[in-house]
């Protein structure tokens, strides 16, 4: 591929989203629109990625921290040509091609961008416009082609909705807002005038300007119109979300995952789910999830950023930032929080919460417990209502429970505390001191049985 740099236009206000969040930071399948675009462009290994920011630039700049992009500013949003001009500050002496794309076209595939770059090289054109055929072209710039010749019909100009004549409006081939320019673009941009209905500097005017200078303008039709659809409103965001989801579920089904009700689950684009896993209605599988084979994901479980082993069951639970082995059971109604590591065959059951804790093989936390900042050994039974008191109001402290220990119901571990192996902790104990291996600990007031005082009878 010829070398190129990319410019992502993202200075516009995106008013149709009706949002205090900049449009390109809205999320599609858990990933911001601009991250989708940057990821696609980045996969083609450009020399530079320049992002043009304006509206709410500060918020966007923060969101882009850590990404390998150069940022330029368009202080006043005077139009897409004016926006691209700002990138000239970085790219003017650059010799390769310039790929221009809006920050709001998240679905465009790297292969489509690659074919645009390729087409531009083959045609030796100064501008190549990625186009699409749509049923309803309203709002888009229309691709106006000249008379047909043997070589096809050349691109004449792009007519914007507000400036187009009736016959131009009837054209269904639209400008995707994705272009490949050569370095003549900078001079062409300086000639753009805001002589149009919106009084804006239109990037689309560069087509006519370049042609007047004897340069070539070409089109590259995209394979799917859907890919190049921009997101301008919440409705379009939802449509894109549904389309991605639909594709994701179809691919899961093809790969041996059972989805009982595809209209009633959410699975992020990046989820990896193994064969013979069954997803019951109600599941929300967010970003960064890997689920093994033969698992059952039951009821309205919310899972994100987690890795689940094979043959596991998760029922009506909230799982975030967790890692599990095989054959584990979570729920019904568990809260598995970040840093939870559940090894093979662990059970965390009804109304139990775990956080930043490693629970080793075969151990059980079956009922109404909180296990935080803890290390639980193998084959441990944690009785109902057990609490690790990990927080003293200032710091978090650790609880260690050795392998083979049996913790009775309603035990409090006041951390930091260390329980040895094969310890028996009596129900109702509040454990404040370490317990050596093999011992029995009881830490509760001894029961007394006293004579009952005579009862005052009500109403006498
Ligand atoms: C633009 C195209 C139109 C095309 C459509 C595809 C122009 C004049 N028209 O129209 O032909 O069919 O995209 O979606 O370009 N931007 C800035 N600064 C500005 C103005 C815009 O950075 O001053 C950015 C926006 O953030 C956006 C992009 O440029 O990413 C396009 O601008 P927008 O106002 O959305 O143009 P459209 O009317 O959609
Ligand atoms: Ca747009």
Image: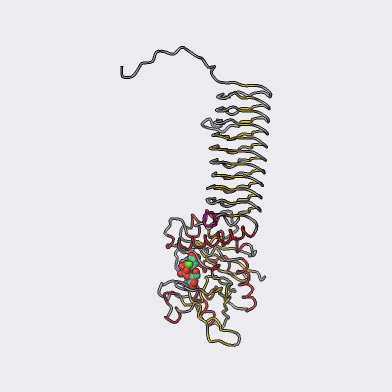
Q: Is residue 79 visible?
A: no
Residue at position x 64%, y 33% in the image: 376
Residue 175 lies, with reference to residue 360, above or below; the image says below
Q: Which residues are magenta?
A: 261-267
Q: Quadrant of the N terminus?
A: bottom right
Residue 331 magenta-drawn?
A: no
Task: Classify 92 as above or below 369.
Answer: below
Q: Is residue 263 magenta?
A: yes
Residue 426 position, x and y percent, is: 59, 23
Kindly identify the residue that appears in the image at 59 percent across and 21 percent down. Answer: 442
| Left/right of residue 384 with respect to residue 56 in the rendered view | right
Q: Is any atom of residue 357 visible in this view?
A: yes
Using the image as rendered, state which of residue 87 and residue 118 is in the foreground.
118
- Residue 302, position in %: x, y? 54, 48
Residue 235: x percent and y percent? 45, 62
Q: Quadrant of residue 179?
A: bottom right
* Residue most extreme to the left: 460
**Quadrant (top left, top right, bottom left, bottom right) of the C terminus:** top left
Which is nearer the eye, 269 or 415? 269
| Residue drawn where x is 54% and y is 68% of the image | 226
Occupied quadrant, residue 119: bottom right
- Residue 436 lies, with reference to residue 222, above or below; the image says above
Residue 196: percent from left, percent from top: 42, 75
Eyeballing the image, is 60 above or below 7?
above
Q: Looking at this view, is 88 or 343 the one in front?
A: 343
Q: Check the image and name the residue furthest to the top.
A: 451
């Amino acid at each position: 591929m010829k070398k190129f740099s990319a410019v992502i236009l993202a200075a516009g206000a995106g008013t149709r989203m009706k949002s205090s969040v900049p449009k390109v930071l809205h999320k599609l399948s858990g990933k911001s629109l601009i991250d989708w675009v940057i990821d696609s462009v980045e996969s083609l290994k450009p020399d530079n990625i320049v992002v043009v920011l304006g509206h709410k630039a500060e918020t966007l700049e923060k969101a882009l921290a850590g990404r390998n992009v150069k940022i330029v500013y368009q202080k006043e949003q005077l139009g897409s040509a004016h926006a691209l001009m700002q990138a000239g500050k970085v790219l003017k002496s650059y010799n390769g091609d310039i790929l221009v794309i809006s920050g709001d076209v998240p679905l465009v595939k790297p292969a489509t961008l690659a074919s645009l770059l390729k087409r531009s090289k083959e045609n030796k054109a100064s501008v190549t416009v990625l186009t699409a055929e749509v049923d309803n072209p309203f709002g888009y710039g229309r691709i106006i082609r000249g008379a047909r010749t043997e070589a096809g019909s050349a691109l004449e100009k792009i007519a914007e909705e507000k400036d187009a004549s009736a016959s131009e409006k009837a054209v269904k081939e639209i400008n995707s807002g994705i272009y490949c320019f050569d370095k003549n673009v900078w001079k062409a941009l300086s000639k753009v005038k805001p002589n149009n209905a919106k009084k804006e500097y239109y990037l689309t005017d560069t087509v006519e300007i370049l042609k007047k200078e004897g340069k070539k303008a070409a089109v590259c039709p995209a394979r799917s119109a859907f890919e190049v659809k921009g997101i301008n409103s919440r409705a379009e965001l939802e449509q894109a979300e549904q389309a991605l989801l639909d594709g994701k579920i179809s691919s899961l089904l093809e790969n041996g995952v059972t989805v009982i009700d595809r209209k009633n689950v959410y699975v992020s684009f990046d989820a990896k789910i193994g064969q013979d896993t069954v997803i019951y209605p109600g599941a929300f599988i967010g970003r960064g999830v890997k689920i093994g084979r033969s698992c059952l994901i039951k009821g309205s479980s919310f899972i994100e950023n987690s890795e689940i082993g094979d043959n596991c069951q998760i029922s009506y639970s909230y799982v975030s930032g967790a890692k599990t082995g095989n054959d584990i059971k979570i729920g019904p109604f568990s809260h598995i929080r970040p840093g939870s590591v559940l090894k093979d065959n662990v059970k965390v059951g009804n109304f139990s919460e775990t956080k930043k804790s490693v629970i080793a093989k075969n151990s059980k936390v079956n009922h109404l417990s909180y296990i935080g900042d803890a290390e639980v050994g193998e084959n441990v039974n944690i009785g109902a209502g057990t609490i690790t008191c990990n927080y003293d109001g200032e710091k978090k402290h650790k609880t260690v429970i050795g392998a083979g220990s049996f913790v009775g119901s309603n035990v409090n571990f006041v951390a930091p505390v260390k329980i040895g192996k094969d310890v028996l902790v009596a129900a109702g104990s509040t454990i404040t001191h370490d317990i050596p291996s093999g011992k029995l600990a009881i830490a509760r007031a001894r029961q007394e049985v006293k004579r009952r005082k005579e009862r005052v009878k009500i109403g006498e």
